[in-house]
Image (cartoon, rainbow, N blue to C red):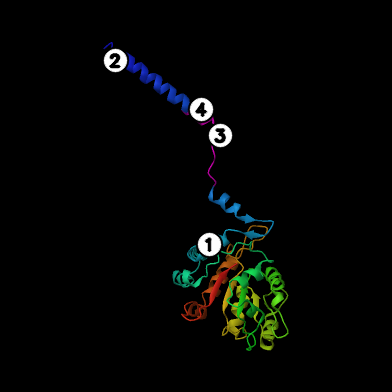
Amino acid sequence: MSQEKPAKSENRASKAKSKKRAREDDSAPRKRKKSAFEQEDLNLDLEAGVNKEIALFDSMLLADHLAQKTRRFGTDLPPVELSTLDISPNAIRDTSSYQEIRNLENLPAFLEAHTEKPESLGEAPKQKGSPHTIIVAGAGLRAADLVRAVRKYQKKNNTVAKLFAKHIKIEESKQFLHKHRTGIAVGTPVRLNDLVESGSLKLDNLERLVVDASHIDQKKRGILDMKETMIPLARWLARTEFKVKYADAEKPLQLLFY
């Protein structure tokens, strides 16, 4: 019995030291793990008006991101329609290697970096109202800014088409497309869709669709972050003509997210 007492004393002393260390550790400041929302905020550059996260996504991540957004905002849509709005990762061009900030100033450089013949951006197909490039924006004001950003490609027989509702009636857009050759068109999803349905906007020569995905407003929202823009965008990108062109073995339609 007398031999067991020192061992018990040592055990009590060891436990006391452990508790003391634990108290000291508790009093030390700990680095709190950032929440998902805080992590997202780190990617938002309000001064530049850019969500830098979009630039980090490869094709697979972008396809998944689109599907998540569509299901988040499409809760009132039938499951059958929701499934038709999914875009295959194979349809999306991986632009994650482009390192520059995705603002208005760098849009021409981005387009040229992802065009086999950059000089072709300044050309227009002979067929009127049939652009080779369509840039999709979330709102008219932003679309107007994008038009100015790509005006360097406008020439005598190549007018940048303004296909959005801000101060422009749909009949004016129809008349413009019937009368002009255009290489690059900039528009909002609903207006673009309506013009295709009317037969005014032709898709025969379309080579690339560019989504203005990185831009955010002062409320930290982009085209993918609001139901009123995301669902029309999803429907636009999932048009049957586009899905056929995405899968074209010889010359697939390029879908790029800027």
Task: Give the extent of the magenta segment.
Answer: 22-34
Q: Which residue is farthest top?
A: 2
Q: Which secondary structure, mark 1?
A: loop
- Looking at the rendered image, the quarter that the C terminus falls into is bottom right
**Along the line of sight, the residue nearer the viewer: 64 or 85:** 64
Identified by mark 4, the residue type is Glu
Q: Earlier in the sequence, mark 2 or mark 3?
A: 2
Residue 30 quadrant: top right
Mark 2–mark 1 Cα distance, whole angstroms, equals: 65 Å
**Along the line of sight, the residue nearer the viewer: 111 or 54:** 111
Identified by mark 3, the residue type is Pro
Residue 9 lies left or right of residue 24; in this view the side is: left
Residue 108, given in percent of the width and then of the height, sits at 66, 71
Q: Earlier in the sequence, mark 1 or mark 4?
A: 4
Q: Which residue is mark 3?
A: 29
Indicate whether 33 appears above or below 180.
Answer: above
Identified by mark 1, the residue type is Phe
Q: Residue at x 59, y 78 (%)?
A: 193
- Looking at the rendered image, the quarter that the N terminus falls into is top left
Mark 3–mark 4 Cα distance, whole angstroms, equals: 10 Å
Tell me if residue 88 can be seen: no
Tell me if residue 191 can be seen: yes
Q: Which residue is mark 1?
A: 57
Q: Which residue is mark 4?
A: 24
Q: Earlier in the sequence, mark 2 or mark 1?
A: 2
Q: Earlier in the sequence, mark 3 or mark 1?
A: 3
Mark 4–mark 2 Cα distance, whole angstroms, equals: 31 Å
Q: Which residue is mark 2?
A: 4
| Label at residue 228 | none
Do the residues under discs 2 and 1 have CB atoms within 8 angstroms?
no
Q: Earlier in the sequence, mark 3 or mark 4?
A: 4
